[in-house]
Amino acid sequence: MGTSSRAHLRSSRAGRPVRVHLLAPGPPDHGVVRHSATLARLLLGSGAEIVDDAPAADVVHVQFTDALWGPDIATAAGGFAEWATRVRAPLVVTLHDVPGGDVDPRRDERRCRGYARVLAAADVVVVSAAHEAAKVTAMSGRQAVVVGLPVERLPCGPRPDWADRPTLGVLGFVYPGKGHDDVVRAAAALPQRPRVVAAGAVSPGHEAVHADLDRRAAALGVDLVLTGRLDDAAMGGAARAVTVPVVPGRAVSASGTLATWWAAGRRPLVADGVYATDQARTYPDALVLYPPGGLVAAAAAALAGPATTLLTGPRTWPDAAAAHLQVYANLQGVRC
């Protein structure tokens, strides 16, 4: 639909809060859905009003990743585009898992075509990292607004039973490409034989990944713990109890897992993908990048000096609420 045919953000609010309708279809544990829920809390805390119905909103803000909108990219993009035709308020779209550079060029092409349809329906596009904005421009010629992922301090649950010995930990869902297998292999190569903790549940449909991981760990003599679903307090307890935090996935577009480690006060080891390199430029003392094949050495150093895995000093993270309120205001140059 786009800005040419959709109503502008109403400027006659007479000082009342901006009314925002947020949408992220999917299970509450999904990272993108959790991101939307976090944004809702932050916006409420900054004076915005969150409304349940799109017709009552000054702006509609939707989170898009193809996995949440359909079984394949064509269905997801088509469903999104059809839904967008019914939106009358200005439409802000935050893109996640932005395509471009996939190892499978045909899959990448399909996803780029689908995401281009989503871009065409949006009045404003938001992404979480500079490299994602570059992908948006390459796909469509449009400029995206970069708003870093919010970092909220996690509540601290009880110390888990598995924390009775040194551990390497990975947070979040277990799914292909997350990097759990790399961490298991690294643990097998370390003289301490640390336990590997997968703090989270298996992503639906990827039970085979868990089975393969169990077999790999057993063959290598590595103790593997899969916690299953964790609420915020339990996740906070797990993130603080892990000896060495690891973010092993290189292909991630923008990582809520990295933000979760930070929210627990941890300085993780991070595989040096594009997003991780972006974040290292901005927060050079908040993570330890390691190259391909470098996890064993990085983990050995962290096990020898666990204090290096803790964030030090006061931290300043992106003010996601203020940034989004500015995005909404810029739709018609009004102050939110």
Image (cartoon, grey):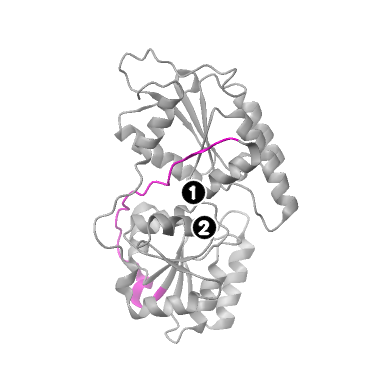
Picture residue at 62% right of the left edge, 34% below the top: 118
Q: Where in the figure is residue 303, as x and y percent of width and height?
A: 37, 78
Task: Quarter of the image for the C terminus: give it.
Answer: top left
The answer to whether 113 appears left or right of 283 in the picture is right
Mark yes or no: residue 93 visible: yes
Q: Which residue is mark 1?
A: 31
Our reading of the magenta stretch's main secondary structure is loop
Q: Where in the figure is residue 297, as x and y percent of width and height?
A: 46, 79
Q: Which residues are magenta?
A: 142-167
How many neighbours does mark 2 have within 10 angstroms: few (below 14), some (14-19), or many (20 or more)? many
Q: Where in the figure is residue 117, as x and y percent of width and height?
A: 66, 34
Callout 1, which amino acid? Gly
Q: Say whether disc 1 or disc 2 marks the residue closer to the N-terminus.
A: 1
Picture residue at 38% right of the left edge, 40% below the top: 320
Q: Which image quadrant is residue 42 in?
A: top left
Q: Nearer the viewer, residue 236 or 317?
A: 317
Marking on residue 173: 2
Q: Nearer the viewer, residue 294 or 161?
A: 294
Say what secondary structure mark 2 lies in: loop
